[in-house]
Structures are given as C-alpha cells and as structure tokens.
Amino acid sequence: MSRRCELTGKGPMTGNNVSHANNKTRRRFLPNLQDVTLLSDTLGRGFKFRVSSHALRSVDHRGGLDAFLAKAKEEDLSAAALKVKKELAKAASATA
C-alpha cells in the first residue's frame, strides 16, 4: 500500500537527520495517513479512503466530501476518489 493521500496526493518527503555533532543522514518524512470513511450527502453513503490529517481538515473546512471533490484537481485524486467524483457529478446533473 503506497503512502500517499488519496484526496490531496501528499506523499513522503526526504530530508536529513542532523545530530548534535552535525552529522547528516538521509531520512523520510511520511504523511500522517488515516483510514477513514467519509460520508457523501448527495449519494447518501460512505466511502473508505486513506487520507492525511491535513486532508481531513480540508474536507471539513470546505463543507464535506462533496464540496471538497467538486473543487479538487483530478491529477491529485486517486483512482477511487476520481470514481466518486464522477458519480457525484453524474448525480448532480441528474437532479438539476
């Protein structure tokens, strides 16, 4: 399972561990990923995603999964999130 957020595309970064003696060794900074079920108001069901804590705050700030996916860039989304975004667009066009 890749260490990548399904909604924002946030992945591992690299850097250095720097000791008190100023020795530098390479390390990885991993995103804080959580397995969560996010509810869609339009579709009336939940979807399981592996997202970063930052993405959870962004979803909450934008007003839920539907609003977040409507504004999200398609290149940042995973295949599963892209599928949900297309379902939401289809449901929105059917009700309009």
Image (cartoon, rainbow, N blue to C red):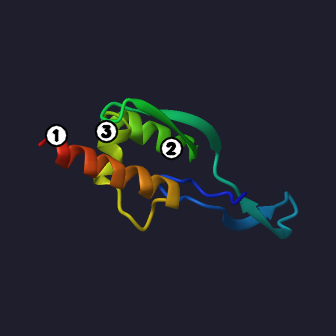
Quadrant in which the C terminus appears:
top left
Q: Residue at x 68, y 57 (%)?
A: 3
Quadrant in which the N terminus appears:
bottom right
Amino acid identity at mark 2: His
The tag earlier along the polypeptide, 3 or 2, is: 2
Amino acid identity at mark 1: Thr
The tag earlier along the polypeptide, 3 or 1, is: 3
Q: Position of residue 90 (x, y in %)?
A: 27, 51
SS category of the residue bearing label 1: helix
Q: Residue at x 38, y 64 (%)?
A: 74
Q: Residue at x 31, y 46 (%)?
A: 88
Q: CA distance from mark 2 to mark 1?
A: 32 Å
Q: CA distance from mark 3 to mark 1?
A: 22 Å
Amino acid identity at mark 3: Arg
Which label is found at residue 95?
Answer: 1
Q: Position of residue 23 (x, y in %)?
A: 86, 68
Residue farthest to the left, as pictured: 96
Q: Position of residue 7 (x, y in %)?
A: 48, 52
Q: Position of residue 8 (x, y in %)?
A: 47, 55
**27, above or below 41, in the image:** below
SS category of the residue bearing label 3: helix
Report the residue marked by disc 3: 62
**82, above or below 67, in the image:** below
Badge 1 local density, few (<14 within 10 Å), some, or many (20+)? Answer: few
Which label is found at residue 54?
Answer: 2
Looking at the image, do the residues carrying marks 3 and 2 touch, with CB atoms under 8 Å apart?
no
